[in-house]
Amino acid sequence: MSAAGSSPAAGADPATSLRELFDLSFSQAPSTDHRDAETEKALSIRIGRDLHLLRLAEISGLLADPVLTPLPTPIRALAGLAGFRGTIVAAYDLRVLLGQPATSRPRWLARTAADPGVALAFDHLDGHVTISRQRESRQREFGEAGTPGKAGRADVAVADGTGSARAVVHVPSLLDAIRQQVAPIPNPLQESQR
């Protein structure tokens, strides 16, 4: 350690320097840097040709190349059921929820944190990005084709490092829209027992 006790000694072998830095990281108080409070992590995704962001805090897992089992349902956004790490989830196509046509089998599923029985299906995962909360602005309403503003809301944010504005999908409002679509569907088994 240096005389100040805050950094490894110059000229020390690399293993010793790394060990000292590791130990030092536990001896110092946590950072009061407020940059963490002003930013959040997100997934950069593409839905069709459009760039979007999914907040990491709103999803609990990702699955590539899911096997979707279609169901007979009047809900156009319901792509089917999928196995997701030992559980069954209802997979909803983000393209349809955002008012675009379903054109191909989605490549990715993101399980929602608020409802682990629901996953959102999308086309392309571009990677992780950091977004600035201060730059979020202009809420935009979107909805399933023919029902503008019903399926959810998106904030527009700038992803650090890219400089491009992207819609941040608001997962809680999508879940609300899904619940509204599912609630009116009668269960034929319950109807026959009456």
Image: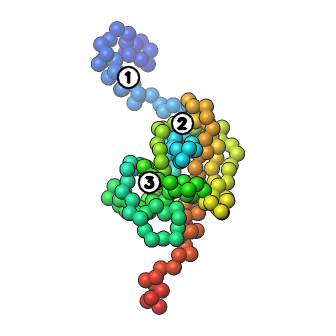
Tell me how far mark 3 sits from mark 1, CA to CA: 48 Å
Q: With respect to residue 23, does 90 lie above or below?
A: below
Indicate the position of residue 82 as horizontal and vertical percent values. Answer: 38, 60
Could you tell me how many numbered marks the image carries?
3
Residue at 36% across / 26% down in the picture?
A: 22
- Kindly indicate whether the residue at mark 2 contacts the one at mark 3 (C-beta within 8 angstroms): no
- Kindly indicate whether the residue at mark 1 contacts the one at mark 2 (C-beta within 8 angstroms): no
> Residue 23 lies in what quarter of the image?
top left
Is residue 158 shown left or right of residue 54?
right
Q: Nearer the viewer, residue 36 or 114?
A: 114
> Residue 116 lies in what quarter of the image?
bottom left
Q: Which residue is mark 2?
A: 130
Is residue 1 shown left or right of residue 168?
left
- Check residue 21 in the rendering and tell me which mark sits there, or answer none: 1
- Kindly indicate whether the residue at mark 1 contacts the one at mark 3 (C-beta within 8 angstroms): no
Q: With respect to residue 65, does 126 lie above or below?
A: above
Residue at 38% across / 48% down in the picture?
A: 64
Q: Amino acid at mark 3?
A: Arg
Residue at 52% across / 67% down in the picture?
A: 75
